Image (tube, rainbow, N blue to C red):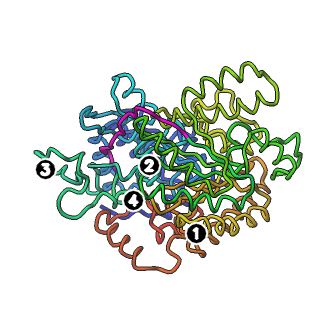
Amino acid sequence: MRIIEEQKFRHEAPDPGWRRGVLAALRAIVGASHASDDPAALRRYRCSTAARASTPLAVVHPGSQAEVVALVRLAGERGLPLYPLSTGRNWGYGDACAVGDAQLIVDLGRMNRIVEVDAELGYAVIEPGVTQQQLSDYLSSEQLDWWIDCTGAGPDTSFMGNILERGFGHSPYGNRLQHVSGMQVVLASGEVLATGFGHYPQARATHLFPYGVGPFLDGMFTQSNFGIVTRIGIWLQPAADCVNHFLCTVSEHEEIGPVVDALRPLRMNGTLRSIVHIGNDMRVISGGRVFPRTEAPGQSCLPPGLRSTLREAAAIGAWTVSGALHGSAAQVAAARAAIRAALRGTRARTAFLSERKLRWGGLLASVLGASRAGLRLRAQLGLGEALFAMNRGKPNGRFLAGAYWRRRAALPGSFPHKADPAQDNCGMFWISPVLPMRGQDVLDLHALVEPLFAAHGFDLFVTFSMINERALGAVLTIAYDKEDAAEVARARECYQAVFDSVMEAGYIPYRVGNQSMAALDPAGDVYWKTVARIKAALDPAGMIAPGRYEPGRAKGLVAGGAG
C-alpha cells in the first residue's frame, strides 16, 4: 500500500491512461453504470451551500458491503483517496463535497437495504442509503407500532449519515447516537469490523446492548475518517397513544432567558422527554418564504419595520419554543400541567396543540378565508401540522425552507419534494456551538454573535435545542445570495468571525463543515495527537476521507488550494 501523492492529484490532471485504468478497475467491481468521471455525473459533488466546493476525481456507487471491501483494497493498491458519503445531504456542513480535491467519491446511496426490523424489541438494521422517508414508509406499510425519530433536514436524507455526524432530531429518541447498537465498518485493510457483541456469531443482543464486552469502539467511527460504516442497528421509538405539542412565545428578546431556566428542570426530571427547540423570529419567518426583495431592494437584512410586520403576520414573538409531549393521555395531561406551572413566573404565552385542535383550526381557517385573522391562523396551522408529522415519525421538508432565504429564484415550485439546497444554488453556513442549559448562556452567546452578523450585513437565524438534559445545541445560520460575489465574500468573512468568536468564548461547535476541519486544533493538543495516532494505526496510508476531522491533514489540503 503506498501513500497518495496529494500534489499530483490536487494540482495536476491525472494521466489519461492512468485514469482510464482506474475507471476500468472501478467498473469491474461495481458495474459499468456505477462509476464515472463525467463532469455531469460529478456536478452534485462539486456543489456546496457553503461556498467552498472541491473537485472530485470520480464517483463510484457500490451496491454492497462486498463491493466496498473490494474498492478499499483497490484504493490501497492504486493509491486512491476515498471519500465515503451516505446520501450527500450534509446541508450547511459540506453537502456532498470532499474536504480536498481529487478524492474518489464513494456514494453509498445504492446501499439502501432495510436489513432487519424486529417488531417485538423495536430496532432496525439499515444500510447507509436508507432515508428517513424510506424507513418511515416501511414501518407504516408493515403496520408496525414503531416510529422513527425525524430531523428537519428533509425526507431524502440518510439516517446513518446524520447519526455518524452525531446529529439530533425532535422526539424522545432525538439524541440519535444514544439509540444506536451494533455497527459494521470496513477498515482500510479491507477487514470488516463488527462492534459491540456483533463479532460473536452467536450473539443474541448485538442490536440491544451497544457496549458489548471490552473497549467501546462505536464512537470512534463517528465524526472520524477511521473506516467506512456500512451497517448500523438503530432503536425505534414506541408509537405513543397520545401526542401533544406545546408552543410558547415571548415578545421581547431578553424574556427567553427565564423560560430556558424554567424548562430546564422539566428536561432534567423527564417531564420533557423530546428535544425542545427554541428558535428566534427569523427561524420561523423563513419557514415559508424567501427574502422579500421587492419590499427591501438592495438589502441583505430585513429592515426593522418589515421584520416586525412579518413577525406579526406569523403570529410570533421574538422567540418561539416548541416541544412534543408523548405518552398516555394521563401522562400528557400531567406534562401540560407541569409546563404551565413552570412557566407561570415568566412572560411566556403558552399554547398546547392536539390533532383535534388542528382539525377545528382548519375548519375555522376556511371560514375566515383570506382575512388577516385567517392568514395568521393558516400560518400557525402549517407549523403545527408539520410538527405533528415529524413527531409521529413522518419526515417533513418544511423546515428546510430557511436554506432558500436569500435564493433569488425563490422556493422551487415542487418544494419541499426532493429539495436539494446545494443543487438549487442556495447559500448557507451553519455554525453549531454547544452551551450550558442556562438562560444567561443563551443571552451571552446571542450577544456575542448578533453584532458580528449585523456588521457583515446578515440577519441572525438561531435555534437553541435541548439536546440532552444539561446542554443546548445551537445552530447559527448565515443565509446568503450565491449569485452576488460581494455577498459571498461577506458571508465567508462573517462565518470566520463567528466561528473564531464562539471558539474563543468556549462555546465549541459539536460538528463543523469542511471549511473548518483545519481549525479544530489550533494549539496541537493531546486529544488530536491521539486521534492522529489512531488514524495512523487503522489507515497508515491515510486513504479514507483525507482531512475529515483530521486537522493536521486538512491544513495541508486547504493550503494547497482545495475548494
Assign a secondary structure to mark 3.
loop
Front of the two marks 1 and 4:
4
Magenta stretch, main secondary structure class: strand
Q: Nearer the viewer, residue 84 or 243?
A: 243
Q: Nearer the viewer, residue 386 or 31?
A: 386
Tell me the CA gap for discs 3 and 1: 45 Å
Residue depicted at 49% across the width and 58% down the height? 9
Residue depicted at 63% across the width and 61% down the height? 258
**Which three-letter amino acid code belongs to the residue tagged 2?**
Arg
Q: Are marks 1 and 4 in contact (CB under 8 Å)?
A: no
Between discs 3 and 1, the one toward the N terminus: 3
Front of the two marks 2 and 4:
2
Between discs 2 and 4, the one toward the N terminus: 4
Tell me where residue 359 sits by quadrant.
top right
Between discs 1 and 2, the one toward the N terminus: 2
Front of the two marks 1 and 2:
2
The residue labelled by disc 4 is 225
Q: Residues within 10 Å of mark 4 (few under 14, many from 20)?
A: many
Q: Which stretch did the figure color magenta?
A: 229-245
Residue 107 has which mark? none
Tell me the CA gap for discs 3 and 2: 34 Å
Check residue 58 for magenta coloring: no
Left or right: 342 in relation to 134? right
Q: Residues within 10 Å of mark 3 (few under 14, many from 20)?
A: few
Left or right: 312 in relation to 202? right
**Residue 100 seen in render:** no
Tell me the CA gap for discs 2 and 4: 32 Å
The residue labelled by disc 3 is 200
The residue labelled by disc 2 is 273
Tell me the CA gap for discs 3 and 4: 25 Å
Which quadrant holds the C terminus? Answer: bottom right
Q: Position of residue 562 (x, y in %)?
A: 57, 60
